[in-house]
């Protein structure tokens, strides 16, 4: 006989086992992505605005990657870590742009569970990677200030590449257990998400199964990864301040050394503030208006990729100088 199909406002999803009463629970559910509740008539303008933000973020991070690639004087640890940060921001843009603009421009609100879980995996992996790279950049600044004569020896290019590979593996492999179970959960009928992209927190709420392991594992993972990264960043800067005070007591000016940390400190704030705000909303804002979820969710994915190139272009003379050369060369008549 033909396989039974259960219809819903979001379409149909093939059923597999798991029946309770009159409801059928599916591991191949179709999720409904969220948008901006109450602002449906303005989706065109909102989508255009968000597309412009994406475009600026992609151009900015691509420019930083290009400048670091073609400029031999920038093949140093500080800029190699900056290239990792820019690549991570580009990945975050690439993984979220299709569904965000699909919802706003084309009203494409349906996404299969497999595609949704894959998007959530890569989104969280890029977030963990960004946190790890910011920690590595803090260590880089400490080594540069504390051991300037051994800086190139301690952070050689092969060592930086190995650090980058280790950070990548940490950001991906540690997520596999949680997403292995997430892909096997049965989901309740008509699951709706809070954002126009997929997050682990949203998917867990839609699962009709015991999610104790995922909730506990992800909470521990956040504390052991992002929490420890932030803790070590603070520790690195306490050691940097101690080294700078030693420089001041010896008659050397610490201002130039401290100026190299300004962009990194701003990048840490740009990353931590939206992540903390979104986490608070999901855990303690059950009664918050849906529009607040939408705004915080878009700030979380757009603010760091947009601001990081701006911060490093304004605060780093080598980057800003090369960028101005590129712009002036393009304006010259042929």
Image (cartoon, helix red, strand yellow):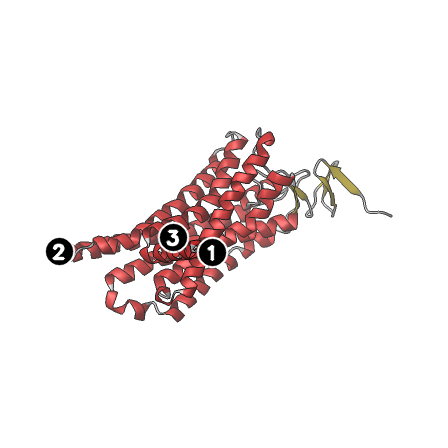
Q: Quadrant of residue 138?
A: bottom left
Mark 1 burial class by Cα count in 10 Å: few <14, some 14-19, many 20+: some
Where residue 260 appears, as percent x and y from the top left, is 29, 55
Dot 1: element = helix
Dot 2: element = helix
Residue position for label 3: 228
Tell me how far mark 1 sits from mark 2, CA to CA: 42 Å
Height in image: 192 above or below 305? above
Q: Residue at x 25, y 65 (%)?
A: 148
Q: Is residue 130 left or right of residue 139?
A: right
**Residue 129 appears anywhere in the view:** no
**Residue 160 appears anywhere in the view:** yes
In front of the other: 213 or 70: 70
Where residue 169 appears, as percent x and y from the top left, is 49, 62
Residue position for label 2: 249
Label 1 close to label 2 by CB (< 8 Å): no
Front disc: 1 or 3: 1
Find the residue positioned furthest to the front.
334
Where residue 125 appears, as percent x and y from the top left, is 51, 54
Label 2 close to label 3 by CB (< 8 Å): no
Where residue 197 appears, as percent x and y from the top left, is 57, 44
Tell me how far mark 2 sits from mark 3, CA to CA: 32 Å
In front of the other: 170 or 37: 37
Q: Residue at x 25, y 60 (%)?
A: 145
Q: Which mark is residue 13?
A: none
Residue position for label 1: 62
Task: Looking at the image, tell me whether mark 1 or mark 3 is earlier in sequence order.
Answer: 1
Q: Residue at x 47, y 56 (%)?
A: 62
Task: Looking at the image, tell me whether mark 1 or mark 2 is earlier in sequence order.
Answer: 1
Height in image: 76 above or below 231? below
């Amino acid at each position: 006989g033909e396989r039974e199909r259960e219809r819903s406002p979001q379409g149909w999803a093939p059923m597999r086992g798991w029946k309770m009463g009159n409801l059928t629970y599916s591991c191949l559910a179709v999720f409904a992505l969220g948008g901006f509740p109450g602002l449906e008539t303005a989706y065109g303008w909102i989508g255009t605005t968000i597309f412009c933000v994406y475009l600026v973020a992609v151009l900015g991070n691509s420019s930083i990657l290009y400048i670091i690639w073609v400029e031999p004087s920038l093949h140093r640890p500080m800029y190699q870590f900056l290239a990792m940060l820019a690549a991570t921001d580009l990945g975050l843009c690439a993984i979220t742009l299709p569904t965000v603009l699909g919802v706003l421009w084309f009203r494409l609100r349906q996404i299969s569970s497999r595609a949704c879980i894959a998007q959530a995996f890569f989104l969280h992996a890029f977030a963990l990677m960004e946190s790890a790279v910011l920690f590595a950049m803090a260590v880089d600044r400490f080594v540069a200030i504390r051991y300037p004569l051994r800086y190139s020896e301690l952070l050689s290019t092969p060592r930086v590449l190995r650090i980058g590979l280790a950070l990548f593996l940490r950001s991906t492999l540690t997520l596999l257990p949680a997403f292995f179970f997430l892909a096997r959960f049965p989901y309740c009928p008509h699951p709706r998400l809070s954002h126009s992209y997929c997050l682990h927190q949203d998917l867990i709420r839609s699962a009709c199964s015991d999610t104790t392991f995922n909730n506990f594992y992800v909470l521990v993972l956040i504390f052991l990864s992002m929490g420890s990264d932030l803790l070590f960043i603070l520790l690195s800067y306490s050691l940097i301040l101690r080294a700078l005070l030693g420089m001041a007591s010896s008659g050397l000016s610490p201002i130039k050394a401290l100026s190299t940390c300004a962009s990194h400190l701003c990048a840490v704030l740009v990353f931590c503030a939206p992540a903390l705000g979104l986490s608070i909303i999901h855990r303690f804002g059950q009664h918050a208006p849906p529009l607040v979820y939408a705004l915080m969710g878009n700030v979380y994915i757009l603010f760091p990729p947009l601001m990081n190139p701006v911060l490093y272009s304004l605060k780093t003379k080598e980057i800003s100088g090369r960028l101005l050369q590129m712009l002036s060369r393009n304006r010259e008549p042929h």
